[in-house]
Each structure stands twice: as structure tokens, then as C-alpha cells.
Image: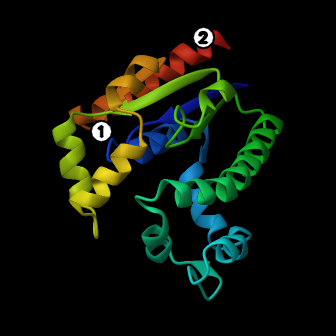
Amino acid sequence: MIVVGLTGSIGMGKSTTAAMFAGAGAAVYDADAAVHDLYRSEGAPVIEAAFPGTVVAGVVDRKALGARVIGKPDEMKRLETIVHPLVHARETAFLETAKAAGARIAVLDIPLLFETGGEARVHASVVVTASAEVQRSRVLARPGMSEDTFAAILAKQMPDAQKRRRAHFLVDTGHGKAHARRTVAAILRALAALG
């Protein structure tokens, strides 16, 4: 089974691209979805113990947690030491299930693939990209997003140009969904040829 790491900075269209891989038959693991689920399950009590007052009715209040960690590197690191092992365990279980099901290609949708050394766990990396203007307009259109929050998120992410240089494949979502879908199909053909 070929394992692909899919990544991209905020607002680049990574989730949409992951859905295109899934629609084309690849097994797809969504790290963000895993975090959301962990915030409603086994991660909640551990996060509450580390950051009291951030869990309401057994579910992590993302806004309250964000206020405690965004822009505070030490607190963010503390949160990551809780969340990353839990997410990694789910990723491992996903890969075992995909392999047992006979999947030829498994895609790991990981926002901070390069930042966390995740490329060591994959055979190839795909970076989803778009122009800075497209990224900015997409992100600032999100509910509750501010310039400061956007800047804080970007500061934590490797610059897009650096990600593009490290990628095996690029999907430019700035040219529309049809273009991105054709690119995904071409990547899957190239990967299948390797397998």
C-alpha cells in the first residue's frame, strides 16, 4: 500500500482536495476530523486537566481552548504533547484497517505534515496550494476569523513556498475544482504506476 501525505497551509483547499482523493477511490484519513472527535471523547478529560475550564459538557470548547493557547508557544506545545500521540494512534489504526481492506493508496490528510516530521511516515507528499490572494480571501471569509488569528496560524505553519519545494506533487486549487480534480487523477495514476 502506498501511503501519501496530503498537506497545505490554511485556506489552500486541502479538505476539498482530500475529498477528491476519496472520491477517486483512495482511503483517506483526516487528522482534523480525528482531533474534532478526540475533543468529544478521550481527549476531553486530559485537555480539561491541563487547561481547566476549556471543556463544557464533556466537549472541548475550541474557542476557550484557542484563547488559552493561540499566540502562546509554551501552552501550544503542551496541548500538542496531549493531542499528537492520540491522533497518531488513530492514524496507525486507520492504516492497518486500510491495508487489511486491500487499499492500494492511503492518503493521510495532515495539516502540519512537514512541521511535525510526518513526511518520514509517507512514501510521497502532496501539497495543496493557491496564490496568497486566494488564500487570504478564503480564510478571512470564514466565520470568526480575524487578521490576528490568521497571522498567528500562518506563523505556526511552514511557508507555502517551502512546502511546495518539499512536495513530490502539487495541487493548485486556485484554478477551480475541475483543474484540481484532473490533477488528483494524474497523481493517482502516477502513484499506481509505482505500486
Q: Nearer the viewer, residue 155 or 191?
A: 155
Q: Residue at x 51, y 41 (%)?
A: 112
Where residue 122 appears, as percent x and y from the top left, is 65, 26
Relative to 175, 163 lies left or right: right
- Can residue 10 be seen here? no
Tell whether label 1 touches label 2 (CB within 8 Å): no
User: At 22% from the left edge and 32% from the top edge, which residue is drawn?
Assistant: 175
Residue 30 seen from this side: yes
Count of marks, rendered view = 2
Amino acid type of disc 2? Answer: Ala
Query: Would you place residue 179 above or below residue 27 in this image?
Result: above
Residue type at mark 1 is: Lys
Secondary element type, mark 1: helix
Neighbor class of circle 1 (other Cα within 10 Å; few <14, some 14-19, many 20+) is some
Residue at left offset 75%, top offset 39%: 95
* Mark pair 2, 1: CA separation: 24 Å
> Which part of the image, by quadrant, shows the C terminus?
top right
Along the line of sight, which residue is nearer the eye, 149 or 187?
149
Image spot of residue 54 (x, y percent): 56, 79
Q: Quadrant of residue 113?
A: top right
Q: Which residue is mark 2?
A: 193
Q: Position of residue 102 (x, y in %)?
A: 77, 33
Query: Crowding near pointer 2: few (<14 within 10 Å), some, many (20+)?
Result: few
State the residue at coordinates (41%, 41%).
Answer: 157
Q: Nearer the viewer, residue 190 or 64?
A: 64
Q: Which mark is residue 177?
A: 1
- The label on residue 140 is none
Numbered disc 2: secondary structure: helix
Question: Could you tell me residue 121's position as x and y percent?
Answer: 68, 28
Residue lying at the far bottom of the rendered structure = 57
Q: Is residue 148 left or right of residue 69?
A: left
> Reading the chain from its start, which is encountered first: label 2 or label 1?
1
